[in-house]
Image: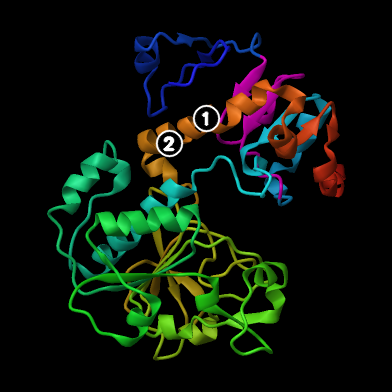
Amino acid sequence: MVELPVRVVVQPSPIRCFKDEEYIAHGITLQEDLSDCDVLLGIKEVPVDWLMAGKTYLFFSHTMKKQPHNRHLLQAILEKNIRLIDYEALTNERGERLIAFGFYAGIVGAHNALWTWGQRTGQFSLPRLCDSHDYAEVLAAYEKMTFPPLRIVLTGTGRVATGAAKNLLDMGIRQVTAQEFLTQDFSEAVFAQIAAQDYAAHRDKPGFFDKKHFYAHGEEYVSAFAPYYRRADIFINGIFYDKKAPMFFSVEEMRQPDFRIKVIADITCDIMPDSSVPSTIRASKITAPVYGFAPQSGQETAPYQPESIDVMAIDNLPSELPRDASAFFGRQLLEKVLPQLLHGRDSDAIRRGMIAENGRLTPAFKYLTDYVAIHV
């Protein structure tokens, strides 16, 4: 138990996964008016009309990439002299994020990949995570499952991919090496988790790969993913994508007879044209998780069509396991962020995560000046 010298109140909500009564049972005060609070913690963007001047807010603002739909939000934060600390910008001295939902995005994304295959083929049926009480309930369902000999390729090595790999292992799917995946046949469902050196190659230097160089100069690399799309039934994408780097494959490649993949679970969910996967033309929703993509036309179709590839690209995957994901996020917040916040201006981590203060952008986020200067 982490004890901090703070008073915590919770704003009532009829739609939260943890009910008001659960907070009351733990002795936490419910309070609609938060004007006496110094720090306000949330997850999603705060509606502009709800912002209170002079406060400190922590939430995912989705402004760091100059997202047009949140320009007015950041403008209002500056106008109201709000100190904005964005979870996405909270990092340690090595640039690694302190707090994120990526692990649970991976768990849900991998589950949905297999759920989509079951819906497409009728070979098996999995429950929706959003209809389950928690992950423990789903684990019990996995024990009764038998999967056909599917071949799954998972990209990435970070939080998202780690969560996805855990889910596949929890399902009882065997992990194999990249080499085994490409050269051997299997009578059971298997997956290979591959890293950048497996799916990218330097354009002019055969056999050369340096991770730091790849991240800094992605434009010098080409995709080496073709051997995997020729062998995989399902592709789960869990990388962080920089648009300087190559896409995994082109739409033209998707039209070729040797493109075997029929289900793409794009957990990264970067939308075209700034996407590592050309079939991710929009995000899907928890209520409608899958759409089809027809390579021949390059257009969206209804899901589960013979001529189409099914795309699962939900952009708020952890919301399908809200209790587990919230508890996980809360532990990170208590252990890694709130102690730093209590250090105030002495905390390097908080300074790195601060986008705005006293009506101005902080030095690290001055690049957003033109973004907030535009009035629409």
Q: Main secondary structure of the magenta part?
A: loop
Q: How many marks?
A: 2
Q: Which mark's residue is nearer the viewer, 1 or 2?
A: 1
Amino acid under disc 2: Phe
Question: Residue 136: which quarter of the image?
Answer: top left
Which residue appears at 49% of the width and 43% of the height?
A: 101
Q: Residue at position x 66%, y 25% from top?
A: 341
| Image: 57 above or below 325 | above
Vertical relation: 111 (above or below) 182: above
Question: Is residue 203 shown left or right of residue 2?
Answer: right
User: Within the magenta stretch, is there residue 40?
Assistant: yes
| Residue at left offset 17%, top offset 49% | 141
Relative to 56, residue 237 above or below? below
Residue 98 point in image, percent of width and height: 58, 41
**Residue 166 at x, y = what percent?**
34, 54
The disc placed on residue 328 is 2
Q: Where does residue 173 sit, x and y in percent of width and height?
A: 25, 64
First in residue order: circle 1 vs circle 2: 2
- Please indicate whether residue 92 sits to the left or right of residue 8 in the image: right
Here the colouring is: rainbow
Mark carried by residue 335: 1
Provide the residue span drawn in magenta.
38-64
